[in-house]
Amino acid sequence: MHELSIAQSIVAQVVKLINKNTAKTVEVEVGEMSGVDPDALSFAFPMAVEGTPIAGVKLKIRKSPFRIRCPRCRKSFN
């Protein structure tokens, strides 16, 4: 389950920023074609924050649809 390592990376980044901002919720965007399972990431996140300065922080996942953008005309297509 690579979502645990993704969750740990998210936690590491938030901990670096914690001195500047106090976080109660971490929001991430997961693309449809990213290969990340949002349910597995939600499951792994509480384990990743346990014992860190941000223990208890909640994870909010925003799913983004697959989109293709033409570099020539700059139109986006789903």
Image: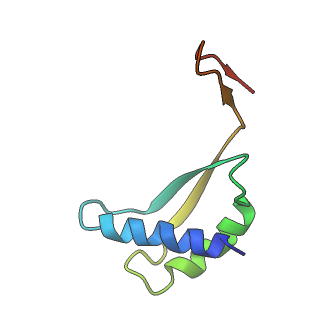
Question: Depth check: 71 or 16 in front?
Answer: 71
Count all numbered tags in the image, as a single digit.
0
Q: Picture coordinates of residue 36 (x, y %)?
A: 70, 59
Where is 27 relative to 18, above or below?
A: above
Colour setup of the view:
rainbow
Question: Depth check: 8 or 45 in front?
Answer: 8
On screen, residue 35 versus residue 57, left or right, reads: right
State which quadrant residue 60 falls in.
bottom right
State which quadrant residue 38 falls in.
bottom right
Instruction: Name the residue rendered at 73%, 47% in the picture.
Output: 33
Q: Picture coordinates of residue 26 (x, y %)?
A: 48, 59
Where is 20 relative to 32, above or below?
A: below
State which quadrant residue 1 falls in.
bottom right
Of the 4 image quadrants, the one containing the C terminus is top right
Q: From this viewpoint, which residue is outermost toward the bottom?
A: 51
Q: Picture coordinates of residue 50 (x, y %)?
A: 51, 83
Instruction: Name the residue rendered at 36%, 71% in the picture.
Output: 15
On screen, residue 49 versus residue 66, left or right, reads: left
Instruction: Name the residue rendered at 72%, 37% in the picture.
Output: 66
Where is 6 relative to 69, above or below?
A: below
Q: From this viewpoint, which residue is outermost toward the left?
A: 20
Q: From this viewpoint, which residue is outermost toward the front?
A: 72
